[in-house]
Amino acid sequence: MNFIYFDCSAGASGDMILASLLSLGVPVEEFRQVLKKLKIRAEVEARKGRSHNLSGLRVEVRVRQTAAERNFAEVEKIILNSNFSLQVKTQALKIFRRLFQAEARVHGQSFQKTHLHEAAADDALVDIVGSCWLLEKLQVSSVYFSP
């Protein structure tokens, strides 16, 4: 697969991105097994759903406990200690770096002192690292998206 285009006119959550990538043919059970490489306690539920006369896959990431706020170094450690490929780790860290940079800018803090709440929680780690793995698995070379 050469590229993927996301129509984000109604937004795009991590669960929505996971669902769209999983619906391209990666077995959900394979994805669940791969997530064990992250070494966090999370479960993925996938089922067919319908919204606004559109049908598709719905994905929900459930975590057993909520993590405290994390800084970039903590997120980086989790990702680097996982058993994913270097490409998946690199892409996931690029995404998290951008999230932390934006948060630092908005709050007028240094990058090192910035903490993320929900965006660095276990479910966000599954969303981001899982999406990066799915893009690798599907051999996607480019990702495009609407505003």
Image (cartoon, helix red, strand yellow):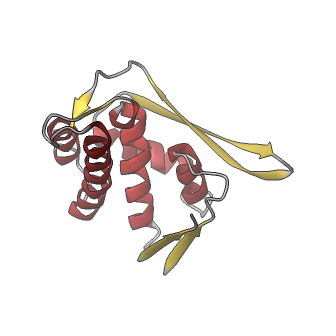
Q: Is residue 88 above or below residue 37?
A: below
Q: Is residue 128 left or right of residue 47?
A: left
Residue 66 position in % (x across, y down): 38, 20
Q: Is residue 85 left or right of residue 60?
A: left
Residue 110 position in % (x across, y down): 15, 41
Residue 102 position in % (x across, y down): 31, 48
Q: 46 or 70, which is in the foreground?
A: 70
Q: Is residue 135 above or below residue 47?
A: below
Most extreme residue toward the front is 108
Q: Is residue 1 visible?
A: no
Residue drawn at 21 percent across, 35 percent down: 114
Residue drawn at 83 percent across, 47 percent down: 52
Residue drawn at 56 percent across, 63 percent down: 147
Q: Is residue 129 above or below residue 139?
A: above
Residue 119 position in % (x across, y down): 38, 37
**Image quarter of residue 111:** top left
Q: 25 or 70, which is in the foreground?
A: 70
Q: Is residue 21 left or right of residue 86?
A: right
**Image quarter of residue 63:** top left
Most extreme residue toward the top is 65
Most extreme residue toward the right is 53
Report how many numbered discs are placed on residues in the image. 0
Q: Is residue 85 visible?
A: yes
Residue drawn at 50 percent across, 46 percent down: 14
